[in-house]
Amino acid sequence: MAGNLTRDEARERARSLTVDSYAVELDLTTGGERFGSTTVIRFACADEGADSFVDLHDAVVREATLNGRPIDPARYDAAKGRLPLDGLAASNELRVSADILYSRSGEGLHRFVDPVDGSVYLYTQFETADAHRMYTCFDQPDLKATFELTVRAPENWRVVTNEAADSADDGVWHFPPTPKVSTYITALVAGPYHLVTDEYVRPDGSIIPLGVYCRASLAEHLDADAIIDVTKQGFAFFEKVFDRPYPFAKYDQLFVPEFNAGAMENAGCVTFLEDYVFRSRVTDAAYERRAETILHEMAHMWFGDLVTMRWWDDLWLNESFATYMSVLCQAEATKWTGSWTTFANVEKAWAYRQDQLPSTHPISADIPDIRAVEVNFDGITYAKGASVLKQLVAYVGRDNFLEGVRRYFQRHAWGNTVLADLLDALEETSGRDLASWSKEWLETAGANTLRPSYEVDGAGNFTSFAVLQEAKADYPTLRSHRVAIGLYDRTADGLVRRDRVELDVVGARTDVPELIGKARPDLVLVNDDDLTYAKIRLDDHSLQTLVSGIGDIRDGLPRALCWSAAWDMTRDAEMATRDYIKLVISGIRGVTDMTVLQTLLRQARTAVQQYAAPEWRPEGLRLLADALYDLAREAAPGSDFQLAYLQAFAGAATSDEHLTWIAALLDGSAVLDGLTVDTDLRWALLRRLVATGRAGEAEIDAEAARDATAAGERQAAGARAQIPTAEAKAAAWAAIIGGELPNAVFRATIGGFVDAEGAALLEPYVERYFAEVGRIWTSWTSDMSQTFAEVAYPFLVVDQSTLDRTDAYVAAENPPPALRRLLSEGRDGVARALRARARDAAAS
């Protein structure tokens, strides 16, 4: 956002103004650079005669009037994205006509040209505060209003907004007013989109019209039936548990090009990352993730759209609630009944990683302005918050929780709230005082660590047993945890739970008298069933059990918890990387959950590339690639396992034998029974050959010609940046910092540039990064500058000099808080890698 609206400014504007309605007219036929936007806002002012401002970005103001009085267009402050409003009346009408730039950054009204057929596609992305990139508005969540849109578009286009059109004549589409909603969830999608329609029929016979959209050139890949099935399952579940009908008139889901996020919960007009239209074969893990995203956005229709946070301090509640409810729905209403295992292995790993960074923050964060919130779409806001909500449900009881949510919706429908409004409702339904819970879990930062401590007698029985709780000195809070302790024994059927004890862990030490006298098991698992949010550690005896037989754990959730503990110990330099790799190789055959499997394989590759001692790294890659080579060839033909193992192999292969086989798979001279080397797999194989110097520009050009699509353009850009030569890196860097790349190609180019195989080539770019990051932060759009600051940070130059250069930059330049945060996170990654490499070297 150009003006970087502050919380104080938003509070004052909300105190003074009450917005009634917007009437927006858009002309999308004026060419490829700008579009016409005319907005009429009707609003009241509590302080007659007061001054205020309205938001508008990247605009040429043609005309503006306030209550019939002209406003000089020269008063528009383009740098701040604001038009001042003087001498407001009790009742006001503002009219602004402007020509506004189309976006190529995925923010505002984004314009894309399909390389397949030349068709133009538009879509909006307004969160957190980019609605004023399309129309003049008071762009903050607590100034809700109705929105009536009229859109002129080329005659072969479809136009989709929050409401269904009530007329579409001669290329002019009219949409009736919405209910009162926030600016950031209004939306416009336009172009020759392919459409599949259906409807959800409620038990009472009423219907919700459904639409699924994608680009025409992707229509052959759109599995609309599967998407609609999950959608209907979600509506049945949410309308029942919320006891409140879906609040909007229709439900469209649109898969749009060059989207920056996974999806966006625009009211009745949800936009999704186009990669969710699978043009090549993917494993079930991708379908599970897509279903979770669909259900996450649907949950927002009630929690976020119907009832909306007052300010971005409560972003966490918005996102955490949707995450928790989407996993609950997935586990209880879809075929992915093991989604809590996925949550434990994926979402919580994200949360634990984020919570250990120097930028960790309380779940309920202090958000002074828009730039602060834009770096807060993180693992704490989504995954830690959802984990804590899961605990809250256990604490107050599920029935009480859902009844409290129903009361919350009833009281605050179409309004704005703060956290206390939800807690008040939950206190009423549960009878519990949640003030101390909120203080302990929402207002403090950092993750606790739980570890078992015990003694046994000569017969191997426990004579003492306690759970020890630890916290970092910087974040010393010891919380109250509800945990289960599982005792697992080796049997003919694998590692099976023999006993389970559930208790509250409070303070630094909690004794567990129930276990005294019981035989020590082969594995002690603290936080069995994943009841709390805490890092767990394994005692030495249990760790030996895992190293020799983690794959023998029969149940998915405890196995996932053990894998997570091992990964966290590796990242914390408590377990040597080479031991973690050997654990993965020995235990991966026992992993039957596809999401957990693919997560483990990604973690193993990261461990070798970043956390292994440099002298052991070649051996580590060889061990990993050898194992994956065998697994891919042994897997059932055509199975998800075959594809997952081969994809992981393509990211680890370095030997001549392995690279020759990859080349043979690519040219068809080698065949793996049941495997189709389709478009995306071809790119994965080729990019490994490029990264290792076995292929170059000619092969990339040939593959790009074969895949002349937007996805092919991105893959080619990433591959060219991946070429391990100084010349290729220099060309990629020039393109990255030039500021001319559209967002999706920009991301792909940076991704190829920072390839681990070319880490040595990145050393000169440490200094170049710090020479550019300040300029880019202040001159580029928020999403693009944040991507550069985060992804281009020299995290692969794992050396003390990188830490020193970061410290020197921060000391000399005093960067803005949001940039300082991203730099501290990058620095922490390098420091962590140095510690892990030292631990691994000590294990040699």
Image (cartoon, grey):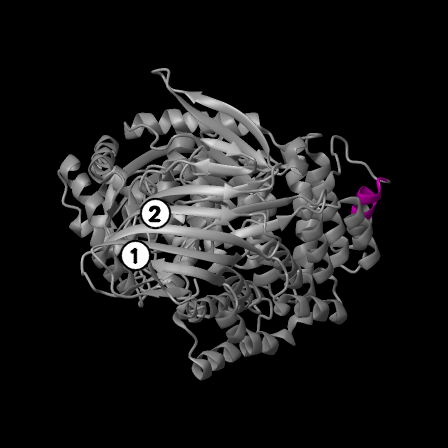
> Which SS class for mark 1?
loop
Q: Quadrant of residue 744?
A: bottom right
Q: Residues within 10 Å of mark 1 (few under 14, many from 20)?
A: few
Q: What's the residue at 86%, 40% (across, down)?
A: 669
Start-end of magenta stretch? 662-668
Pointer 2 and pointer 1: residues touching (CB < 8 Å)? no
The residue to which callout 2 is attached is: 182
The residue to which callout 1 is attached is: 67
Residue 2 visible in this rendered orientation of the protein: yes
Residue 573 visible in this rendered orientation of the protein: no
Q: Main secondary structure of the magenta part?
A: helix
Q: Relative to 574, is 713 above or below?
A: above
Q: Relative to 380, is 252 above or below?
A: above
> Which SS class for mark 2?
loop
How far is disc 2 from disc 1 in space, using C-alphas?
Answer: 24 Å
Q: Is residue 667 magenta?
A: yes
Disc nearer the start of the sequence (2/1): 1
Q: Amino acid at mark 2?
A: Ser
Q: What's the residue at 22%, 51% (across, down)?
A: 438
Q: Relative to 280, is 109 above or below?
A: below
